[in-house]
Image (spheres, rainbow, N blue to C red):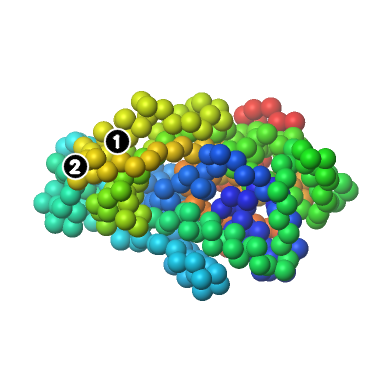
């Protein structure tokens, strides 16, 4: 397993539980998306793309059991919020569109109704309430998965940077920056925004880093996740997180005054109670593909090479389902979800792969 973020770690745990011996090549990097994420579980934000909506909804509905089982296993409490997401209308035209869209799977709330459940919000045009969406504390979740891996008899974790992948007969060989070579029946590319830097992982070249900046406010101002026109707000414990920017700056994980100021202003325009409560800011790198869909599945020319990367803004959300799918692929089981749309080979004709 190349990568120890939430995607790679959840997959490693699921594979080990199924009886596989797993080696994880983990390299701690500043800006890794799993540690930086706000943890939104928001399949309803993907309604424009039905294939992604189905995948995201199936993943979201795994979370109650996923979180409960990890908590029982590790003793780590994981905050899971499924109160729903409030998507605020930007203007009257957007309100009309949302009210029409929400009919099948959510509820349309007028501004006064929104203020009754979230008195601190500034709402002018109403909001869609997407029930069962929400957020998970991704730092607690990652800590629990890592705790379970650390005590698993079938898992060995190496602090090493993988640099290249090569086929070795019907097996895979992984070379590290430190000069160590590992071999196994399969290699899984799950290195997040850095997946494209692996030589030999040809379709991972589709993944590029997109920086997202976030601001934390030391104020528990909300009970629902709020998705506004210029930012989102996520309640986490006694805090509220505002995110997020989308910036093509390579692997630069620094925050900027402009980005932080813009997020802070956007957050305060939605929830004035956050005034003066900003405590810290940080940035993460989303692993993004050209079509914003993840790479899940084997290399079409080499079934021993598996991709699990490019999850964009949905890495936390898709982690438990991706883990199950990888287990099914590697153990040659019947897939519980059709991943045709997410196969890595879809990029074979759109850019050069080597």
Does residue 185 lie above or below 193 as drawn? below
The residue shown at (32%, 51%) is: 239
Secondary structure of the residue carrying numbered label 1: helix
The residue shown at (77%, 38%) is: 177
Counting every numbered tag in the picture gives 2
Which residue lies under the disc numbered 1? 264
Earlier sequence position, callout 2 versus callout 1: 1
Which of the 4 image quarters holds residue 200? Answer: top right
Q: Residues within 10 Å of mark 1 (few under 14, many from 20)?
A: many
Of residues 243 and 352, which is closer to you in this image? 243
Q: Residue 57: x and y, percent?
A: 44, 57
The residue shown at (46%, 37%) is: 283
Which residue lies under the disc numbered 2? 272
Of residues 281 and 135, which is closer to you in this image? 281
| Quarter of the image where the C terminus is located | top right
Does residue 11 lie above or below 284 as drawn? below
Which of the 4 image quarters holds residue 337? Answer: bottom right
Does residue 337 lie above or below 52 as drawn? below
Secondary structure of the residue carrying numbered label 2: helix
Q: Residue 201: x and y, percent?
A: 72, 39
Q: Is residue 122 left or right of residue 102?
A: left
Whether residue 307 is visible here, answered yes or no, is no
Q: Residue 263: x and y, percent?
A: 32, 35
């Amino acid at each position: 397993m190349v990568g120890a973020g939430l995607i790679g770690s959840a997959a490693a745990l699921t594979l080990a539980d199924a009886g596989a011996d797993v080696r994880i090549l983990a390299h701690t990097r500043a800006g890794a998306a799993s540690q930086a994420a706000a943890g939104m579980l928001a399949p309803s934000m993907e309604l424009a793309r039905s294939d992604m909506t189905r995948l995201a909804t199936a993943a979201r509905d795994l979370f109650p059991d996923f979180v409960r089982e990890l908590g029982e296993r590790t003793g780590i409490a994981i905050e899971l919020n499924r109160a729903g997401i409030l998507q605020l209308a930007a203007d009257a035209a957007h309100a009309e569109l949302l009210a029409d869209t929400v009919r099948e799977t959510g509820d349309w709330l007028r501004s006064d109704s929104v203020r009754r459940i979230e008195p601190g919000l500034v709402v002018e045009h109403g909001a869609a309430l997407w029930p069962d969406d929400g957020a998970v504390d991704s730092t607690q979740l990652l800590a629990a998965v890592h705790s379970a891996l650390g005590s698993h008899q079938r898992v060995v974790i190496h602090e090493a940077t993988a640099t290249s992948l090569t086929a070795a007969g019907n097996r895979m060989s992984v070379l590290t920056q430190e000069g160590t070579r590992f071999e196994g029946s399969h290699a899984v590319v799950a290195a997040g925004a850095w997946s494209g830097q692996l030589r030999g992982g040809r379709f991972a070249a589709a993944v590029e880093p997109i920086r997202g900046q976030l601001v934390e406010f030391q104020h528990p101002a909300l009970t629902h996740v709020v998705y506004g026109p210029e930012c989102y707000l996520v309640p986490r414990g006694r805090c509220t997180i505002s995110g997020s920017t989308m910036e093509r700056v390579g692997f630069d994980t620094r925050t900027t005054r402009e980005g932080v100021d813009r997020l802070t202003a956007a957050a305060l325009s939605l929830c004035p109670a956050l005034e003066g409560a900003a405590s810290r800011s940080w940035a993460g790198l989303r692993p993004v593909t050209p079509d914003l869909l993840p790479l899940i599945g084997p290399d079409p020319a080499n079934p021993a090479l598996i991709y699990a990367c490019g999850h964009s803004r949905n890495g936390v959300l898709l982690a438990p389902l991706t883990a199950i799918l990888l287990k099914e692929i590697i153990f040659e089981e019947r897939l519980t979800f059709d991943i045709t749309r997410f196969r890595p080979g879809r990029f074979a004709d759109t850019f050069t792969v080597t």
